[in-house]
Each structure stands twice: as structure tokens, then as C-alpha cells.
Amino acid sequence: MAWIEANGLSLRYEIEGGGPSLVLIHEIGGSLTSWDRVMPALGRRFTVLRLDQRGAGLSEKVRAPYGVDALADDLAALVEQMDLPGPFHVMGAAVGAAVAVRFASRRPVASLALLAPALDMPETRSAFMRERAARAMAEGLRPILPITLDRAWPEATRGSDAYAAYRAHYLANDPHGFAYANLALLGEDLRPEAARLDCPMMLVGGTMDAVRPPEAVRATAAALPRAGLAFIEAGHFMAAEAPEALLAAIRPFHDRLLNQEKRKAS
């Protein structure tokens, strides 16, 4: 692991693998370790850059609200210092998908894979996120597990080692950083912005996702006429919970793009 000063913050990141560049953007409550179970396969095909976003994991803790713009600026500043070949393939989970879209609207990307994408925040959901943020700041993470992690991870697989590891990391979150991440998407609707992008795009939803259920992912896909859509048997944190199913869903998408890149280079 390594740290770098980017956009006025200390950000933890890792670079692994070889091949075209792939950037991974984690979800609320996650970190770069959210991708651990898919990294062996991705690292065999891509040079993978993943980071702890501001306030998360082992990146610098913050004590002021921020939005999607700041998260995209953090990523852009990090990428500019990494000297990785572009354009980048980008994969974002949940609110990380919103960061991916905003990043892609500012610089060319080779593709976007959006997992359980949170590109908008309806007012009913906004009220819940504000309440959850306030409780996290006042009480910490453990008291809100029933309305956060346990709602997002299917009960049938909560006895797994993957759940135990994710839960331990989740409880280690800085409550303020977690709270501000909950507020980052308020007032945003990135679906029109995503629809204007001309890069290849794929959405993946979880059939057991209670946070971004299949009907919500389908509605997002309907606003993105050029995007592919797939569903896997998983909850919200699919990279940690169902890595094999996720990899199987996105592999054909990446295969097609990598083959096109090879033909262009030959």
C-alpha cells in the first residue's frame, strides 16, 4: 500500500497487475479492500488502480461536508500523478458509480462498469441518508448496522467469512467520514450526465439488493439507452459478496473492449 498527496489530501492507493488501466471506486462504508476478492482476476488483465476515497479506509479523515465533485477531483488528481496509460476503464460501486460518471464527464475514459449504481437521490431516500449520517456521527457505526450493512447484505450469506471480514472493516469506519459520504449525493441526478457520455457502459444489479433493487437499476438503465445491463444473484456489496458472479457478468463486456483495443493497436 502507498499514500500520496492529491487535491490537498493524503490518499491511500494501490496499483497492481499489468495491461490496460482500470480504476476501481468503492462504495459508502467501503475502501480499496472492497475489491480484494475480484483483484486476482482483474490484475491478470489490467493495471488496476484502487484507492480509499477521502474520509474512508486509511485515507485522510475529513471534518467538512463534500460532494461528488470533490470525490471526482480527488480521483483526477491521483490519476494525474500516477502516470498510467489512458484512457482508463473505470468501475464504480453504488455512490462510487456516481463518482465514475462525474470523472468520465471531465476526461476520456475507455469504459464504465457501474455496480448497483447510485446516480440519483430521490427526496425520500435523501431524508433517510440525512438521518443515517446524523446517527453515525452521534452513535458510531455499530448501532446503525441494522439499517446499513445488514440491510444491504442478504441474510442467507451473513454466516460467510466474506461477511465477517466486510463487517469488521465496516465497523472500523470513521463515523464522520461515513456520515459525509452519505451526504455526498444529495441533490444530484447524474443520469442525464451519464446519458451524454459516448463511452461503452454496463450496469450490474443484484437480484437480492434491497438498497438499489432490480427495479431501480432497470430505471437507471432505461435512462442510459446505450448501456448494457446484467443481474447477478447478490446483494448490494457484490464485489465482496459474490465475486465470481460479478466477474462472470463483466468479463464479456471487458473482453469485447480489450479485443477492440488490440485490433486498433495491430
Image (tube, helix red, strand yellow):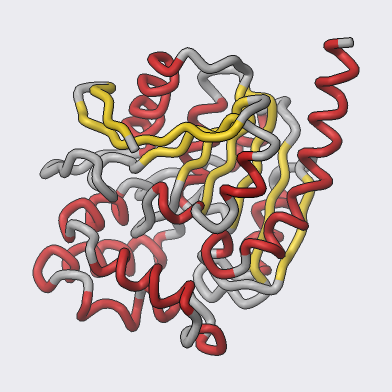
* Camera-side residue of 136 and 127: 136
8 lies above or below 71: above
Q: Is residue 186 above or below residue 263?
A: below
Location of residue 194 by image quarter: top right
* Spot occupied by residue 7 in the image (x, y as percentages of width and height): 26, 22
Seen from the viewer's position, the closer of residues 256 and 210 is 256
**Quadrant (top left/top right/bottom left/bottom right) for the C terminus:** top right
Give the left or right position of residue 63, taking residue 119 as reference. Answer: left
Please provide percent x and percent y for residue 128.
Answer: 33, 69
Residue at the location (55% across, 58% down)?
A: 37
Give the residue at x 28% y 22%.
Answer: 6
Residue at 65% x, 37% y: name it. Answer: 112
Please give the name of the residue rendered at 38% of the width and 15% of the height, measured from the top-left corner: 81
Quadrant location, the N terminus: top left
Residue 152, visible in the rendered structure: no
- Closer to the camera in the image, 184 or 83: 83
Above-or-below relation of 263 to 11: above
Count of numbered marks: 0
The image shows residue 167 at horizontal and vertical percentages of: 35, 73
Q: In the displayed structure, does residue 22 sit left or right of residue 160? A: right
Quick one: 115 or 258, which is closer to the camera? Answer: 258
Is residue 24 among what the camera can see?
A: yes
Image coords of residue 101 (percent x, y) = 55, 35
Left or right placement of residue 55 versus residue 242 in this view: left
